[in-house]
Each structure stands twice: as C-alpha cells, then as structure tokens.
Amino acid sequence: MIISIITSWGVNEHWGVMATYTILTLVSSFTPIRTLNSPLTLNNAVIFSGIVLYGTWIGVWSALLEIIIISFIFKSKVSRALANSGQVLITVWLVGTLDQFFRTYYPDYWFLTDIGLILVYWLSNTLLAAAGISYFREVSFQVIIKSMLQGGSMTYLLLMAVGEIGARFVGAYEGYSLTILLGTVLLLRSVFHQYFASISDQQKKMEEIKNLNDSFLIALAASIDARDPYTLGHSFRVAHWGRETAKFMGLPPKQSTEVYYGGIIHDIGKIGIEDNILNKEGALSKEEFERIKEHPVIGYEILKRTSVFPELLPAIRWHHERVDGTGYPDKLKGNEIPLIARILAVCDAFDAMVSDRPYRKGMSVEEALRRIQEGAGTQFDAEIAANFVTMIKSLNEEELQKIIRANNRNQEIDVSLTT
C-alpha cells in the first residue's frame, strides 16, 4: 500500500503540512471526547480531513507517525503497534483510493461522495479495530463489534462529518476558517461532555435503584424460606436453576434475569399460610394441601397491590400450572402458561424432588431427571424439560451437589452455561 502511493506523497514540498497534521493527530489522541460507553478521539477526523485536502499521502504519514510516537511513549508491544499501523494503513489507503476515483469520475458530486467516504472510513476502521481488540483480548468478534456499534457510532460519524466540513472550509477560505472550525470543535466537546455526564449520573441513580430492588427481593426470599426451615434455600436454588435454564435455551439476558428474580419470589404467597401447615413434619391432609395450593394467588395479590415488578407476576401465580391443564390455580394449558412460569415449574419440581424433607430423603438426581422426562408434555413443557435435563447432565457431580446443598444465596454457585 505504501509503495502504491509513494509517487504522490510530495513530502519534500509539504514538510509544514506533514508536521502540522502529525501534531494535530497527536493532540487529538490525547484530548478525547467522552461518550457514554467509551472515549472517542478526533484523530480520525483530522486524518480524514487531510485526505480530502491533500490526498492519501498525508493521511498515511500523519497516522503512521502518530502510532510510532504513541507506541514509543506507552511502550506498546511491537505486535500491537504493527496491528494498529495495519488498521490505519488499510483504512486510509481504501478511503484515499476511493477519493481519487470520485474526484476523477464524479467531481461535481463531492457532497455525496464525501458522505460515502465517511461511511467507508467509519466501517473499515471499526471492523479492523474490532478484529484487533478481539484478537489481543481473546474476546468474541461479534461481542466487540456489537459493543462498538452501540457505544458511539453516531458520535463517531458526527466527528468525521466535522472533519469533512472543516476540510472543505479550509479548501475554500484557507486559514481563516480554522478559527471557526476550532471553535466548533471545542463547543461540540463541551456539549458532549455535559450531555454524557448527565446520562452517566442518571445511569448511576438507576443502578442504585436496581441494587435496592435486588436487596429487597433477596431479603423477601430469605424471610419466606425462614418461615419454612425444611425448604431453606429453596427460592435461591429455583432462581439459580431458572436463570441457567433460560441462558441454556438462548434467551436474552433481560429475560434470564427476570426468570431469576421470578424464582426468588415465586413462593412469596407462603407468607399467608399458617405455620402449623408450613412446618408440619408429616404428610399434609387434603384440607391442608388445598390451603397450601392457595399460595400462588396470595403471592400474586400481594405483589399486584404494590404495583412493583409487574413482569414477575406470572412467575408467582402460575408456577404450579401444568401444560395438560390440570395444574393450579387457573388450570392453564400449554402456551397459555407464560414462559417464565413454565421454566420455573420444572426448576421448582426438580429442587423439591432432590431436597431432603423430615418425612423423606431427597431422591437422586438421576431419578428426578427421569421423572421430569416422564412428565414432559403433561406436567412440564416438553422443550423446556429437555433443555433442563441436558443442562443438568452437563454439570460435573461435585458442582451439581454443591448447588443442591446450598441453603442461601451466598452459597449458591454462579454457573455460566453455553449451548
């Protein structure tokens, strides 16, 4: 790429231009504009303006000298410095080549071609940067590119547009326009700083509210389990299995989190059940069991009146429904039962089967999984049951038993499963 453009560099005639652009790119690198997720520098806008004004050679020179100087200052590894150089060379060469093509064949459409060049520069630089970050940090390319596109793409394009407008102003009005351009950039920097600082403050407040809600739900679950010592830790284990099942099924993080919190408070209605029934050591009578069956509705009404966490209401009311319509309290069938409740139904049953009770010892994991498979399509959603069984079988025995024996949130193992 360097050899292909070496005849057009014209360095001897433009030492001043090269030095100015190199300094500008360096200054831009050390004065980033803060966005919500990451800082953005103006150096690419500066390099782009150089390409528009003087051609590819100035972009190559200023970018490479900037990388060499910064790599020396921060003592970067040679491999990373070379990767950065390659990223810039490819981007600059591609944009510069397209610019020459447009100047030759479409000189009267410079406004549209400039927009095209901005998009090409942004896309090329973003993809190459994501590839480099993915390689050196050993993180999925898809994850990196998604984060970059969501983090500041519009701001990046706006900065590139500022570079393009600045180049056109300088080309038309020479040095006088630099004062206006500099003022515009400083104003933009100030506006961005205030805007993103305000959003950051709002995010912190939202995070504080979320943490408060988390603490409230966890305390609520602990109080529920404390009333029934024979099921201590049940809510946390069901929540754990529910979240891992949702993740295993490929549900979005937001849904997985909702399943988790639904599991945390799915038995909130037991607050309204008498102690002599909850703490009974033997089997329940028919009347006592009918009373226990009221806890989904009791919990549903409690949470509904508070007007908080409406997305968790289905988990509370319908986690004892069966897909064949013989469950309680509303005898819903199949997909009439919300997904969150269908997931928790499997997890709730599994934990109940493998946990010890005063009147019986918990069954083996193998037996519990066999019963879940037998109940697929009648008691449980067949697809969810199959995913749950596969997920449990993927865990090693020590890890599995540690979770089964956990009796509070602090003992819970945070298992990350992937399909």
Image (spheres, helix red, strand yellow):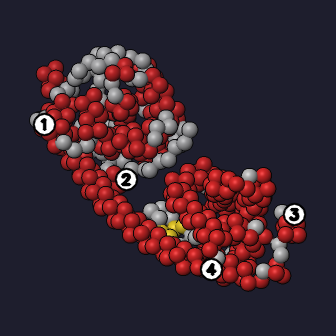
From the image, tell me which residue sits under label 2: 411
Residue that mark 3 sits on: 4
Tell me the kind of residue under disc 1.
Gly
Residue 73 visible to the viewer: yes
Please tell me whether mark 4 sits on a helix, a strand or a loop: loop
**Label 3: few (<14), some (14–19) or many (≥20) C-alpha neighbours in 10 Å:** few
Closer to viewer: mark 3 or mark 2:
3
Lower sequence index among marks 3 and 1: 3
The residue singled out by tag 4 in the image is 175
Quote the CA–CA distance across marks 4 and 2. Answer: 67 Å
Distance in Å between CA atoms under marks 1 and 2: 27 Å
Residue 95: give x, y in percent of width and height. 72, 59
Q: Amino acid at mark 3?
A: Ser
Q: Position of residue 250 (x, y in %)?
A: 50, 37
**Residue positioned 58% across, 79% down in the render:** 176
Of the two numbered discs 4 and 3 on the same chain, state the one appearing first in sequence.
Answer: 3
> Is 141 positioned to the left or the right of 407 in the image?
right
Residue denoted by label 1: 272
Q: Is residue 245 above or below residue 143?
A: above
Residue plotted at (49% across, 31% down): 387
> In the figure, is residue 232 to the left or right of 50?
left
Q: Residue at x 88, y 70 (%)?
A: 7
Left or right, 131 with respect to 227, comes to right
